[in-house]
Amino acid sequence: MPASKAPGVRLNAQWRVRDDGAVQWVLELRHSKPGKAERWSGRRFHVERAALLRSINELCRSVDPHHLAAIAALPKVYKANAAP
């Protein structure tokens, strides 16, 4: 799957949303260990904004309201390169 060049929206210290540039938005979890590079893994994959917001509410705990507003402003249904 091609990765978008957009870094996405960092929701908090452990979670971010990005788009894959082709099919969907990806809710990613950060993994970091001392002495190793930061790594992100996709946890949930969404085409509908409402479902993405539900996942954020369920998994991400505290989220910056400005970043949440950026997600809420996305199109209802995923469109390629509609990065947050």
Image (cartoon, rainbow, N blue to C red):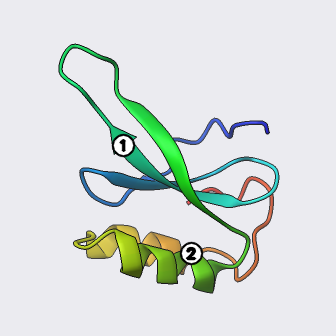
Looking at the rendered structure, which numbered label has been put on residue 39? none
Residue shown at the point (27%, 70%) measured from the top left? 63
Residue shown at the point (34%, 27%) measured from the top left? 38
Q: Residues within 10 Å of mark 2 (few under 14, many from 20)?
A: many
Residue type (three-letter) at the residue carrying disc 1: Arg
Q: Which residue is mark 2?
A: 52
State the image quarter where residue 33 is shown. top left
**Which quadrant, please, contains the C terminus?**
bottom right
- Tell me: 52 left or right of 22: left
Q: Is residue 25 above or below residue 40?
A: below
Residue ranking furthest to the top: 35
Q: Is residue 44 above or below residue 40?
A: below
- Tell me: 75 left or right of 50: right
Say what secondary structure mark 1 lies in: strand
Instruction: Determine contact: label 1, label 2, CB under 8 Å.
Output: no
Looking at the rendered structure, which numbered label has been put on residue 30? 1
Residue ranking furthest to the left: 34
Q: Is 4 or 37 nearer to us in this picture?
A: 37
Residue type (three-letter) at the residue carrying disc 2: Leu
Query: Residue 45: horizontal and vertical position, in percent?
Result: 64, 62
Q: Is residue 54 above or below residue 38?
A: below
Query: Residue 77: horizontal and vertical position, in percent?
Result: 76, 78
